[in-house]
Image (spheres, grey):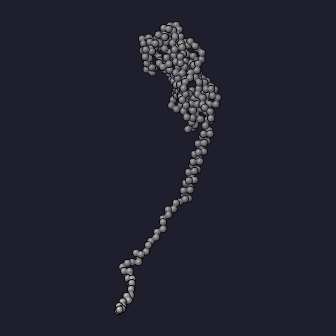
Amino acid sequence: MSLISTPQVESIIQFSPLPQHVEEGHNQIEVKEPCIERFDWETIAIMLRLALVGMLLVGLALSQRQLNQPTFVPTPPKFFLDSLHIPHFKVSEGEVSAAWDVTLTISNVMNNSNINILRLEAEINYMQNETLAMITPLMPEYELQREVFFLEGEGLKSLHWRLSTTGWEENQPIVDDIVVQAIAEDMQRGVTRFGLHMKVMGKVQFGDGWVAPFAMFPTCNNMEVKFLGNDQQGKAATMTDPKRRECIGRIEWESVSDSID
């Protein structure tokens, strides 16, 4: 048996160097620090303080205004019809010619406020809704007039005015033929009914400067009148129940405000 000798093989591993054209800088890795945005906290704190002070000032002003507002409910004036007299009333050729003399008392029942009536409109109605004559006895004489009809606390004043129509005035309502005929039939019976409707604009003025504007619509309905004797101008008439009566109606209040505003 022959032996075959195997020569030893020596393993050599060689590392070739990096090529010369590869720059060292390519092997460097840049690490960037995160960018942290910085706020001006001092400026923000100042702005917050200013906003808080502003809110406090507004709140104090509103609370002070609320404390100064009147704590009681304003009371409107009262209207009393003292008398209604008709010196003449005539129906002729489909037209109504008449006059109504009205005496009215306006009262301020409050003792701690004044009332300034700025405008009063009145009309005489037949059957509550058929207007025969109208007038505006109270109104400003010039623009921005501050007082027109002034009532101090617990004060009262009387008004007297005449509403009239001949059936031909441009500033008076046109009465329908059916209404004229119904009135003529009432005259033959000797009795008819009229109503006094008013529209009032004014202000309740408190002593501390607060003002409450209002609009009210007092009415006196179903005022029965009886016709008396005839004359050349027609029949006169007077109320069958001459006692004093209060004219009442709805009231519309506006917001209470400072008179300085």
> For the image shown, how many numbered marks are present on the structure?
0
Q: Which residue is drawn at 52% across and 19% down?
A: 196
Residue 148 can be seen, yes or no: no
Task: Tell me where residue 91 appears, x and y as whole percent.
Answer: 45, 11
Residue at image position (50%, 63%) is 36
Q: Which quarter of the rendered picture does the N terminus lie within?
A: bottom left
Name the residue furthest bottom: 2
Tell me if residue 124 comes above or below residue 61 in the rendering: above
Position in image of residue 155 (x %, y %): 62, 25
Tell me the residue at 58%/37% (across/down): 258
Asked whether residue 155 is in view, the answer is: yes
Rendered residue at 54%/16% (across/down): 223
Which of the 4 image quarters holds residue 167? Answer: top left
Closest to the observer: 18 or 134? Answer: 18
Q: In which quarter of the image is residue 250?
A: top right
Task: Using residue 194 as the reference point, say whether residue 2 is left or right of it.
Answer: left
Residue 212 is situated, as x and y percent measured from the top left of the image, at 57, 32
72 to 156, vertically: above or below:
below
Residue located farthest toward the front when viewing the structure as drawn: 1
Quadrant containing the C terminus in the rendered view: top right
Q: In the rendering, at what x and y percent does residue 143 appear?
A: 50, 31
Residue 154 position by quadrant: top right
Which residue occupies the foreground of this view, 75 or 139?
75
Is 82 placed left or right of 165 in the picture? Answer: right
Residue at the far right in the pictured view: 111
